[in-house]
């Protein structure tokens, strides 16, 4: 996030697979089969044209950065298709299986139960558009949104330290993606937890992800001052 930002928390994530089940046939007689890839194409189009516009109408009060990430999102992380038996894909065959992995990020204003139900309704609707279509949903991971209290003593102490180091008030933000704060909050029950450290957020998972040495030094200084304020000298 960089030395001037204190991250209060993050959005939620729902990772899931949708599997389209087709019917194999020889590629020279494709009319005898049903392409799972074609059926998946119809589902992907429905997500793009029917769900994405609805998600764009929702906005979180959580200060998520970058600004577009204050809205919920849905990304298709991967699509694979071919024969259900596994192994090498036989090119002269109609694909009887296609799997898409989805990454649904949700905001605190959305309940996970409704997020999951919304996905299930859309999948069922696309399935119902054609009696031959069949989809199944397999869940991979669920992480709920979390955030430290804005008036937390930890947030206040770290913000003061940041201002001392960088020379201007700290920016309180939230992360578009999840990180280990979820474990502290959900498992350990530690609500007063934040993320702070160097590195530009926009470079995350990019080929040239980097961290400036000056930012590393500044963040280390801010953390040292925060520790000194909260715990006192040894």
Image (tube, rainbow, N blue to C red):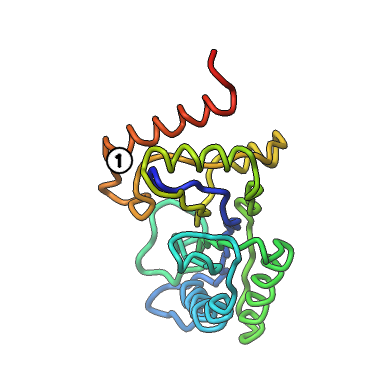
Q: Secondary structure at mark 1?
A: loop
Q: x, y (%) of residue 37?
A: 46, 72
Q: Is residue 36 above or below residue 62?
A: below
The residue drawn where x is 60% and y is 65% is 61
Other-residue count near label 1 (Cα within 10 Å), few / some / many at <14 / 14–19 / ≥20: some
Tell me the quadrant of the picture where the C terminus can be found: top right
Give the residue furthest to the bottom: 129
Q: Is residue 124 above or below residue 234?
A: below
Q: Nearer the viewer, residue 155 or 12?
A: 155
Q: Is residue 194 above or below residue 82?
A: above
Q: Quadrant of residue 55?
A: bottom right
Q: Nearer the viewer, residue 16 or 111?
A: 111
Q: Nearer the viewer, residue 165 or 143?
A: 165
The residue drawn where x is 47% and y is 53% is 171
Q: Label 1: which residue?
A: 211
Q: x, y (%) of residue 89?
A: 39, 59
The residue drawn where x is 27% and y is 37% is 214
């Amino acid at each position: 996030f960089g030395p001037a930002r204190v991250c209060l928390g993050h959005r939620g994530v729902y990772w899931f697979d949708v599997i389209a089940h087709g019917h194999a046939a020889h590629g020279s007689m494709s009319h005898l089969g049903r392409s799972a890839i074609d059926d998946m194409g119809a589902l992907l189009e429905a997500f793009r044209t029917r769900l994405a516009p609805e998600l764009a109408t929702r906005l979180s009060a959580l200060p998520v950065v970058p600004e577009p990430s204050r809205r919920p999102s849905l990304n298709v992380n991967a699509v694979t298709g071919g024969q259900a038996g596994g192994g090498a894909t036989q090119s002269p065959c109609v694909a009887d299986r296609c799997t898409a992995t989805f990454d649904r990020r949700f905001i605190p204003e959305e309940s996970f139960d409704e997020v999951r139900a919304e996905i299930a309704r859309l999948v069922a609707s696309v399935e119902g558009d054609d009696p031959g279509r069949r989809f199944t949903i397999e869940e991979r991971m669920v992480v709920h949104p979390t955030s430290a209290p804005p008036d937390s003593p930890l947030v206040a102490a770290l913000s003061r330290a940041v201002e001392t180091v960088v020379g201007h008030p700290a920016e309180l933000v939230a992360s578009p993606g999840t990180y280990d704060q979820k474990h502290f909050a959900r498992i350990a029950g530690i609500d007063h937890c934040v993320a702070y450290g160097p590195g530009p957020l926009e470079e995350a998972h990019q080929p040239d992800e980097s961290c400036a040495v000056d930012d590393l030094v500044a963040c280390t200084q801010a953390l040292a001052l925060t520790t000194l304020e909260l715990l006192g000298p040894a």
